[in-house]
Image (tube, helix red, strand yellow):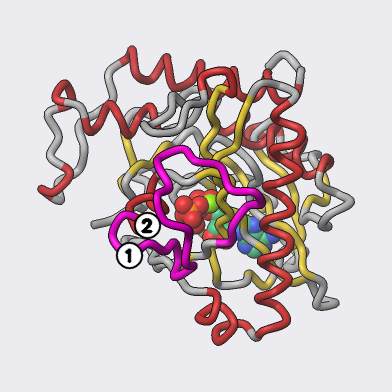
């Protein structure tokens, strides 16, 4: 299985292409090895498959929303952003960032129990090995976000839940504690802000890296509909799956009879119909507009 995009990365004068992830293309500015141009594409992935077609404006929404959140979170953690002055071809969907030594852990925090966390809980009563009280149901809220890290799997492999002890072994006890504190505080603060705008952030994934001084810095993207589950607050009702603003919508279509796709087959999913593309774009834009109070 491959998650590499079909399209060759854009040629950008003055920059050398370094790497393409499922969503972002990374470039090194010529002569500035300690910086990166992080370009968010309109690609969308689900169940670790790159889907077709792309979602118009998705890269710009993710980039602009992350920039907004980085500012809101500045008193909790420094971030990797250096400048939003980027080449015209990627304007609006790219940022110039500090090139960091990335911590090899997907830092997940959950404010509500659902998704992969709920599935592990149903089997073992734990999430990422963390023991939870009995009797919790889909959509239940925790008093304070829980830290449920996972491995950063190599391309084509699935991220696996990681116990806190495994994180301590991988990166050391001090850094593990910092990752847990920062990740849960980011989600708690995110929810304080989002609640005023009618959105609940059920869970999120962040990535950290260390800069040349060894300082822990928030990288990649933050509190976007790609990295988080956003729920409309007025419809929250534990006990069943919640409606959402994020790509859960795409996952639901893929799992529906209409798509005709069998996840267990291991085959690539079918192309998204125009209606699903349009609605997904609308959900991303709505999440951006509701959270930031700006018009996209
Ligand atoms: P996913 O987001 O689902 O884990 P991915 O790794 O393929 O998958 P992309 O968002 O497409 O994600 O790629 C972005 C890549 O850039 C990631 O590998 C991320 O770790 C890396 N990255 C982000 N910010 C920085 C930074 N400041 N310095 C170095 N690498 C970074
Ligand atoms: Mg990513």
User: Could you tell me which residue is drawn at 67 percent across and 63 percent down?
Assistant: 208
Q: Residues within 10 Å of mark 1 (few under 14, many from 20)?
A: few
Between 64 and 178, which is closer to the camera in this rendering? 178
Q: Is residue 37 visible?
A: yes
Q: Position of residue 33 (x, y in %)?
A: 73, 68
Between 223 and 94, which is closer to the camera in this rendering? 223
Q: Secondary structure at mark 1?
A: helix
Q: Residues within 10 Å of mark 2 (few under 14, many from 20)?
A: many
For disc 2, the marked residue is: 121
Position of 6 relative to 257 (above/below): below
Check residue 124 in the rendering and tell me which mark sits there, or answer none. 1
Tell whether position 214 is magenta: no
Answer with left or right where residue 189 lies relative to residue 238: right
User: Could you tell me which residue is drawn at 38 percent across and 41 percent down?
Assistant: 45
Q: Report if the CB atoms under discs 1 and 2 are less than 8 Å apart.
A: yes
Q: Position of residue 177 (x, y in %)?
A: 70, 74
Q: Position of residue 191 (x, y in %)?
A: 69, 38
Q: CA distance from mark 1 to mark 2?
A: 5 Å
Between 87 and 239, which is closer to the camera in this rendering? 239
User: Could you tell me which residue is drawn at 33 percent across and 12 percent down?
Assistant: 275
Tell whether position 125 is magenta: yes
Magenta stretch? 122-147
Label 2 beta carbon less than 8 Å to ligand 1 = no
Query: Where on the picture, by quarter, is residue 182?
Result: bottom right
Q: Is residue 17 visible?
A: no
Q: Quadrant of the N terminus?
A: bottom left
Query: Where on the picture, by quarter, is residue 167?
Result: bottom right
Q: Secondary structure at mark 2?
A: helix
Q: Quadrant of the C terminus?
A: top right
User: Could you tell me which residue is drawn at 66 percent across and 66 percent down?
Assistant: 180
Q: Position of residue 273 (x, y in %)?
A: 27, 18
Q: How many marks?
A: 2
């Amino acid at each position: 299985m491959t998650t590499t995009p079909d399209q060759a990365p854009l040629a950008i004068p003055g920059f050398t292409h370094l790497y393409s992830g499922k969503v972002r293309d990374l470039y090194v500015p010529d002569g500035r090895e300690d910086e990166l141009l992080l370009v968010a594409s309109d690609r969308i992935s689900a169940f670790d498959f790159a889907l077709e077609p792309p979602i118009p404006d998705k890269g710009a929404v993710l980039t602009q929303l992350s920039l907004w959140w980085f500012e809101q979170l500045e008193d909790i953690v420094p971030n990797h952003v250096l400048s939003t002055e980027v080449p015209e071809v990627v304007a609006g969907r790219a940022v110039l960032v500090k090139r960091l030594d990335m911590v090899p852990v997907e830092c997940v925090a959950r404010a509500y129990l659902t998704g992969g966390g709920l599935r592990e809980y149903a089997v073992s009563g734990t999430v990422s090995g963390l023991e939870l009280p009995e009797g919790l149901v889909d959509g239940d809220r925790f008093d304070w976000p829980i830290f449920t890290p996972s491995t950063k799997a190599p391309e084509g492999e699935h991220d696996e839940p990681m116990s806190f002890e495994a994180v301590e072994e991988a990166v050391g006890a001090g850094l593990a504690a910092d990752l847990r504190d920062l990740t849960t505080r980011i989600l708690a603060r995110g929810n304080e802000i989002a609640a005023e705008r009618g959105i609940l952030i059920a869970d999120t994934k962040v990535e950290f890296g260390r800069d040349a001084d060894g300082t822990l810095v928030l990288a990649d993207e933050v509190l976007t509909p790609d990295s988080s589950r956003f729920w409309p607050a007025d419809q929250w009702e534990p006990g069943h799956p919640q409606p959402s603003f994020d790509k859960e919508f795409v996952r639901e279509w893929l799992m529906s009879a209409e798509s005709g796709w069998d996840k267990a087959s291991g085959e690539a999913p079918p192309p998204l119909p125009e209606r699903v593309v349009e609605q997904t774009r609308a959900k991303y834009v709505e999440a951006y507009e509701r959270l930031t109070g700006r018009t996209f």
